């Protein structure tokens, strides 16, 4: 049964869900306020609290983009899209198990650790192609809402657009950073002012550089000690 949400709550929830499906991460409170014309972030926070109480949203209070749907919202036929871009979800898809390949650094590059575990991720994150999961180690991407211990869902591909967050191999070491190509060199930018960009100059660099994939999703687990 669908949660008993008000029309405005449904619109806000569906906006968050579409944003995650399109960009791989949740909108910030500022982006939500701008989208709906709210004058105060307090209004946004009030909606997020109510959605969390309804059980359709999980919120991490210390994270910049720390919200995610607990499951796609199931709308009734009268709530289907009227051309506004909000479409109905007919069923809750089953999660997909992806291989957990090891650790990727969000600080200094570290060697990827081959593992044989899997992690279930929402089906909405998978849009075709090959995907895998890595566990984040370090805090150089915290301003993008990527924290130590998070799991990043990566779509495997050998190239990326400027500004995309990628997992890259530098030599035999893996790192997660924003990607920029500047002429003959590549820049891997952190999202933390305490860290410096990693510059790979193809004319003088002896280490091999390779893009392993681009970020399409983020999983944050709240495991309680046994």
Image: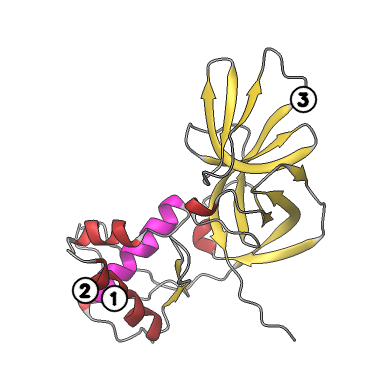
Tell me the residue that label 3 is attached to. Answer: 207
The circle drawn on residue 47 is 1
Sequence-wise, which precedes: disc 1 or disc 3? 1
Residue at the image position 39 percent from the left and 71 percent from the top: 90
Residue 176 position, x and y percent, is 63, 44
Dot 2 surroundings within 10 Å: few (below 14), some, or many (20 or more)?
few
Q: Is residue 14 magenta?
A: yes
Q: Quadrant of residue 134?
A: bottom right
Vertically, is 131 above or below 198?
below
Sequence-wise, which precedes: disc 3 or disc 2? 2
Q: Quadrant of the N terminus?
A: bottom left
Residue at the image position 17 percent from the left and 60 percent from the top: 37
Residue at the image position 41 percent from the left and 78 percent from the top: 56
Q: Nearer the viewer, residue 110 or 210?
A: 110
> Taking the image as drawn, is residue 54 in sight?
no
Give yes or no for contact between labels 2 and 1 (Cβ–Cβ under 8 Å).
yes
Residue 108 position, x and y percent, is 70, 43
What span is in magenta? 9-23
Q: In front of the other: label 2 or label 1?
A: 1
Vertically, is 144 above or below 171?
below
Q: Quadrant of the C terminus?
A: bottom right
Residue 186 position, x and y percent, is 59, 25
CA separation in Å, label 1 and label 3 = 49 Å
Mark 2 lies on a secondary structure that is helix
Dot 3 surroundings within 10 Å: few (below 14), some, or many (20 or more)?
few
Mark 3 lies on a secondary structure that is loop
Tell me the residue that label 2 is attached to. Answer: 8
CA separation in Å, label 2 and label 1 = 9 Å
Residue 96 position, x and y percent, is 62, 64
Q: Is residue 130 magenta?
A: no
Vertically, is 160 above or below 136?
above
């Amino acid at each position: 049964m669908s949660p008993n949400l008000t029309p405005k709550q449904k619109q806000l929830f569906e906006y968050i869900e579409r944003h995650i499906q399109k960009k791989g991460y949740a909108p910030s409170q500022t982006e939500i306020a701008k989208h709906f014309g709210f004058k105060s972030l307090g209004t946004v926070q009030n909606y997020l609290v109510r959605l969390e109480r309804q059980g359709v949203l999980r919120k991490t209070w210390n994270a910049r983009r720390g919200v995610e749907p607990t499951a796609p919202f199931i709308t009734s036929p009268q709530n289907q899209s009227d051309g506004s871009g909000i479409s109905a979800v007919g069923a809750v898809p089953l999660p997909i198990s992806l291989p957990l390949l090891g650790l990727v650094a969000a600080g200094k590059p570290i060697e990827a650790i081959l593992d044989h575990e899997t992690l279930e991720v929402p089906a909405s994150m998978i849009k075709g192609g090959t995907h895998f999961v890595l566990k984040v180690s370090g805090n150089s991407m915290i301003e993008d809402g990527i924290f130590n211990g998070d799991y990043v869902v990566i779509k495997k591909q050998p190239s990326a657009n400027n500004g995309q967050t990628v997992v890259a191999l530098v030599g035999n070491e893996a790192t997660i950073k924003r990607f920029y190509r500047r002429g003959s060199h590549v820049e891997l930018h952190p999202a933390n002012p305490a860290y410096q960009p990693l510059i790979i100059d193809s004319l003088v660099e002896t280490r091999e550089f390779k893009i392993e994939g681009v970020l399409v999703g983020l999983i944050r687990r709240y495991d309680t000690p046994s």
